[in-house]
Image (cartoon, rainbow, N blue to C red):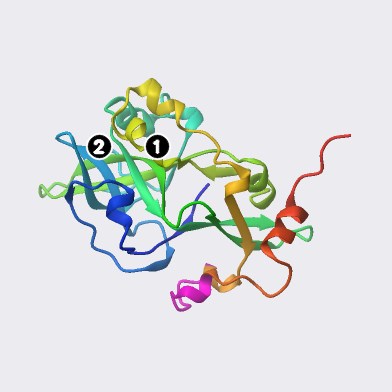
Amino acid sequence: MCGKFVIKLLKQIDSAFEIERGSWEFVDNYRVLPTLQVPVARMRDGQREALMMRWGLIPFGAHGVPTKFGLINATVENLKANYYWRGPWERQQRCIVPAVGFYEPHVNEDGSKQQFYVHLVDREVFGMAGLWERSIKPDGTEVLSCTIVTLPANQIMASVHNEKKRMPAVLAREDHDAWLKGSPQDAHSVLRQYPDGLMVAYPVHKRVNSPKEPNDADLIAPLPGPTDLAYKEKLRPTPPA
């Protein structure tokens, strides 16, 4: 799953997602948490639109009231069948959630958890596949919300996120069009594991878990110790005999 991520308002963010209308209004956030407003790209009237949405999908018929389940992640295996994901999927309400990195927990041998920060080596900013929904409050206020699609982890992410072995569906840049405006078959085909060799994961300080701690770049600073590569090798699963 993906429960925390990082986003920065970079100069190249509009061009990275080929935004044609709208704009994003946010500040650099090194601990994006559920229920916050997050930047989203979607198709509207044939153009790519930038806008902000609540992270944590609110179903169409919920009258703007969040469910008790959070709905921050949609599993790729259940997009067509799950009660909450089926509607947005069938209506082709697909979106992209920009990020520069995300966090996942690793369960240690003693049962404690160590947060890891994950980012890409080939792009500073990337997009995670998402679904969006529109719900109307009794007073007529429109609430736009989104969820991030997750899938089975690749090898390095399975080693990091070793409890649930999931990862967000990180999109290749050339797959943005297929996800946003392709047929359901084409869109589903781009939901695949991002290559291990293009991802870096390293441990970060536990204060990333506390909203009371400063929200700054120190949250993604690697802990003193082995290099990223050393941790990668250490966490790789042992091949079966």
Identify the residue at horizontal 53%, vertical 69% (top origin). 220
Is residue 101 shown to the viewer in this render? yes
Question: Where does the image place residue 108, in percent across and percent down from the top left?
Answer: 74, 59
Marking on residue 174: 1
Marking on residue 60: 2
In the rendered structure, which segment of residues is drawn in magenta?
209-219
Q: Quadrant of the C terminus?
A: top right
Question: Where does the image place residue 205, in percent across and percent down from the top left?
Answer: 60, 72
Identify the residue at horizontal 31%, vertical 34% (top origin). 180
- Foreground pick, 189 / 86: 189
Q: Nearer the viewer, mark 1 or mark 2?
A: 1
Whether 75 is drawn above or below 220: the answer is above
Direction left: furthest residue: 140
Identify the residue at horizontal 27%, vertical 53% (top origin). 14
* The image quarter in which residue 33 lies: bottom left
Marking on residue 89: none
